[in-house]
Image (tube, rainbow, N blue to C red):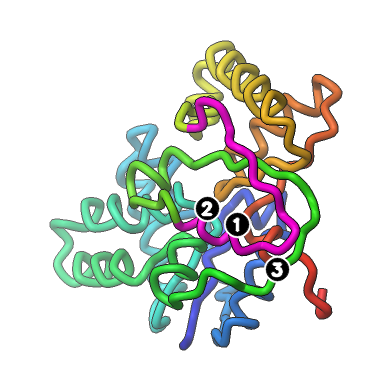
Amino acid sequence: MRVSLFITCLADQLFPEVGVSMVRVLRRLGCDVHFAPEQSCCGQAHYNAGYVPEARRVARSLLDALEGSDHVVTPSGSCAAMLRHSYPTLFEEDGEEAARATALANRTFEFSQFVVNVLRVEDVGATLARSATYQPSCHASRFIGVRSEPLRLLAKVRGLELRALPNAQDCCGFGGLFCVKLPAISSAMAAEKVSHVASSGAEVLVGTDMGCLMNISGQMRAGGSRIEALHLAQVLDSGHADR
C-alpha cells in the first residue's frame, strides 16, 4: 500500500520527530511511505481568515504534490479536515480541479483513523510504562469523526496506564487563528485545560494534533509542570528495537 505523508506546517517546522515516529509506525505495519518534498501548507489559515483565492493557490500546489498516492495520512485532524471538507468546496466551480480535490478528500486520513479503520490494526506492539491522559482534538472529533480510534490504540500499549481527563471534550483554546485574534480568551481556556490535565495525575498528555499539544504544553511549562506532551504517533513508536 503506497502512503503519502502529509506532514503539516507545525510538524514540519517545529515537531519533525512526530513525522519520524509516524513513518516508523506505518512502515512496521507494512506501508510503503513516501514524502513529497514539494508539499506545503494546506491553506487552512488563509481559508479561515477569508482569503479564499490565496487558499486556493496554496491548495492547488498540495493537490499536485499528493497526486498518485493510494492514501494520504497526516498527524493532524485539523489539516485532514481541511483536505476532506474544504478542498471540494474551494474547487467546486473549477471543473477538473474539483474532481482532483474530491479524490484527494476521499483518500486522506488522520493518522489514528488510518491505522484503525483502513489498516484494521489496534495493537502496533508499542510499550510505554507511564501513566497518560488523552486530549481529543476538536477538528478531528467534530469534523472527521475521530473519537474512539486513538483510545483503542492507546489501550493496547503495553505498560501504559490510561487515566480519564476531566472535561476532555472542551477546547484547549488553540483554534488556529483564534489564539492569535483572541489571545486572552485562548490563554484562559488553555489554563483551564492545564488544570484538568494536572488533576488526572498523569505523567504524559497524549494528543493527535500538535497545535493542541503545543498550546497546552506551553501553559504547562510556564507553570513549571513536568507533564510531558506527546503526539499519539510518538507513543505508538515507543518500545521498539529500531528506535
For disc 1, the marked residue is 154
- Is residue 95 placed above or below 88 in the rendered structure? below
Q: Which residue is mark 2?
A: 151
Give the CA separation, mark 2 to mark 3. Answer: 14 Å
Image side of residue 32 versus residue 21, left or right: left
Sequence-wise first label, 2 or 3: 3
**Which percent across, then down, holds residue 108?**
38, 66
Q: Secondary structure at mark 2?
A: helix
Residues rendered magenta in the picture: 149-168
Instruction: Tell me the tag on residue 126.
Output: 3
Residue 167 within the segment the image draws in magenta? yes
Quarter of the image for residue 154 reads bottom right
Q: Quadrant of residue 98?
A: bottom left
Q: Residue at x 64, y 40 (%)?
A: 163
Residue 225 location (% of width, % of height): 82, 27
Query: Which percent across, then down, holds residue 228?
Result: 78, 41
Q: Considering only vertical position in the picture, is 56 above or below 114?
A: above
Dot 1 surroundings within 10 Å: few (below 14), some, or many (20 or more)? many
Whole-number angstrom distance, CA of label 1 to CA of label 3: 9 Å
Q: For the residue carrying disc 2, how many other residues have a C-alpha within 10 Å: few (<14), some (14-19), or many (20+)?
A: some
Using the image as rendered, state which of residue 59 and residue 128 is in the foreground: 128
Q: Are marks 2 and 1 in contact (CB under 8 Å)?
A: yes
| Residue 202 lies within the magenta run | no
Question: Looking at the image, which is closer to me, 120 or 16?
Answer: 120
Left or right, 91 with reference to 35: left
Circle 1 sits in a helix, a strand or a loop, which is it? helix
